[in-house]
Amino acid sequence: MPTPPSPVIEVPPPPPLIRAARRKDIAALVAMISALAAHHGDASSIDEMRLERDAFCATPWIHFLVAEADGEVVGFAALRPFYSAPQGVRAMELHNLFVVPSWRGRAVGRALVEAALQHARGRGCRSFSVGTATDNAAARAFYCHLGFEAAPVPGPRFRVAVEPVPQKA
């Protein structure tokens, strides 16, 4: 009697490593930021020089965590600190979250959010927030599943374009 074939066991790839972004990640981040903008129907004007200036300078304006799998960056979380002066409270906003399509559904977004929360705790934050587009039911469900609660919207926000003052060399 022939021996029956051994069953094929599919071994899932290991989960990605979540770490702080490095300069070597800039090209991948620019590509994913542009993909996120396109997903929302927006145009992206980000480029490698701007991202390096804003995320990898002596006093960064924004902090990125990345998910790395097999040496490739497959997702990111962009974090912005802010301060509530009346309460004297440090806070953090998850400004953007993105996972490349081939890695969605594998808990990469969850891992990025958990690492972002840990980053905020480590910076002494007492609040962590994220916003979504009003029509993004999937994102709202995702954040609620992770324990976030809908927060009241405080009212309209206003903005105006500002021309920066050239920095002296």
Image (tube, rainbow, N blue to C red):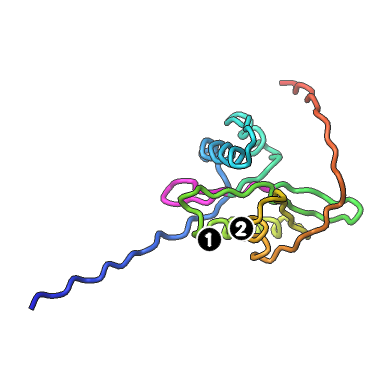
Q: Is residue 57 above or below residue 77?
A: above
Task: Say if the magenta span includes residue 54.
Answer: no
Q: Residue at x 76, y 21 (%)?
A: 166
Q: Nearer the viewer, residue 2 or 127?
A: 2
Q: Earlier in the sequence, mark 1 or mark 2?
A: 1
Q: Is residue 102 left or right of residue 127?
A: left
According to the image, label 2 marks what residue?
A: 115
Q: Residue at x 74, y 48 (%)?
A: 81
Q: Nearer the viewer, mark 1 or mark 2?
A: 1
Counting the numbered discs, the total is 2
Provide the residue span drawn in magenta. 66-79
Mark 2 residue type? Ala
The C terminus - image quarter: top right
**Quick one: SS at disc 2?**
helix
Mark 1 residue type? Ala
Q: Nearer the viewer, residue 103 or 18?
A: 103
According to the image, label 1 marks what residue?
A: 107
Q: Main secondary structure of the magenta part?
A: strand
> Which residue, as the protein is rendered here, is positioned at the far left?
1
Q: Is residue 50 left or right of residue 101?
A: right
Q: Position of residue 116 (x, y in %)?
A: 64, 55
In which quadrant of the rendered view does residue 152 lie? bottom right
Residue 151's tag is none
Q: Is residue 109 above or below residue 6?
A: above
Q: Is residue 2 above or below residue 54?
A: below
C-alpha separation, residue under disc 1 versus residue under disc 2:
12 Å
In which quadrant of the rendered view does residue 46 lie? top right
The N terminus - image quarter: bottom left
